[in-house]
Image (tube, rainbow, N blue to C red):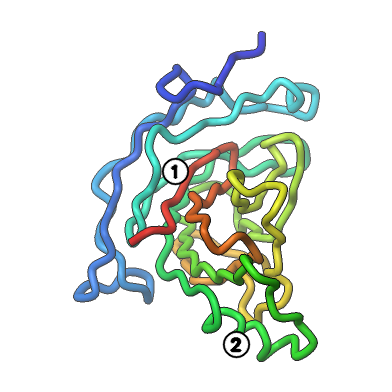
Amino acid sequence: METDTSDYGTENSIDTQETEIDENNTKSGEVFSQIDEVKGFDENQIAVDSDNLETEVGIESEETIPYGMTDTLNGFQTVDGVSIPVTVTIGIKDVIRGKTAYSELLEKNAMLQAPEKGKEYIIITIYMEYNAGEVEEISLQENIASLKAFAFYFELPEERENAEDVTGCLENSLYNYSLKVGESITGKIAFLHNETENGPLVFVGYGNTVELSLID
């Protein structure tokens, strides 16, 4: 039976604890403070084999993750048609926009066109950590799949018709990495979008859909 997840606060919502970036503390090589507690994972919400993937219901976070903070998410990685529980931490570490972002993108792609009037490039630095799980390694490769069991991507949904993903122009694209248990990474994603827009950024992955604020 399909369950409606369009309204936050339903039985499929995940309650997570947020943790603020602390420049004085180091965690997994990055400056993030300790996650206090993780709640809300329900194994009944994940697909257990390939026959059930079409009816899998994702988990939506109840609140937008503030800029400079992280959330720890309980979800799953699909391996050979089986959904295996994993726990990951995600947050936005930095955002650069306009001429500064364009200059960085030009370092890899000298032919990248300057944005037209009213548009700008935006580069978002994402922190991700693979906290726990039975999967040996999780891939961060982009996969814009219709089923959350397979999806892994970021988007600016308020600008879906106007935002263009230009992450491929980055030297350290987040999508180039994979993580083993206990490892963390900071990688970048980039868009060409309307300069008046401020997100939020949406992450879809590991059966979760969460919003992250772009505003400090």
Q: Quadrant of the C terminus?
A: bottom left
Residue 48 placement (x, y as % from top left) = 67, 27
In the image, residue 103 sits, relative to residue 1, either above or below, namely below
Q: Is residue 43 above or below residue 116?
A: above
Q: Which residue is located at x 52 percent, y 67 percent?
A: 124
Query: Which label lies toward us, 2 or 1?
Result: 2
Q: Position of residue 160 (x, y in %)?
A: 68, 47
Between 107 and 140, the one lying in front of the other is: 107
Secondary structure category for the residue under label 2: helix
Q: Residues within 10 Å of mark 2 (few under 14, many from 20)?
A: some
Tell me, yes or no, if residue 56 can be seen here. yes
Residue beneath the point at 45% across and 50% down: 212
Mark 2, residue position: 103
Q: Is residue 172 left or right of residue 215?
A: right
The vertical placement of 38 against 93, above or below, is: above
Q: Secondary structure at mark 1?
A: strand
Residue marked by disc 1: 73
Q: Earlier in the sequence, mark 2 or mark 1?
A: 1
Q: Position of residue 21 (x, y in %)?
A: 28, 64
Of 82 and 120, nearer the camera is: 120
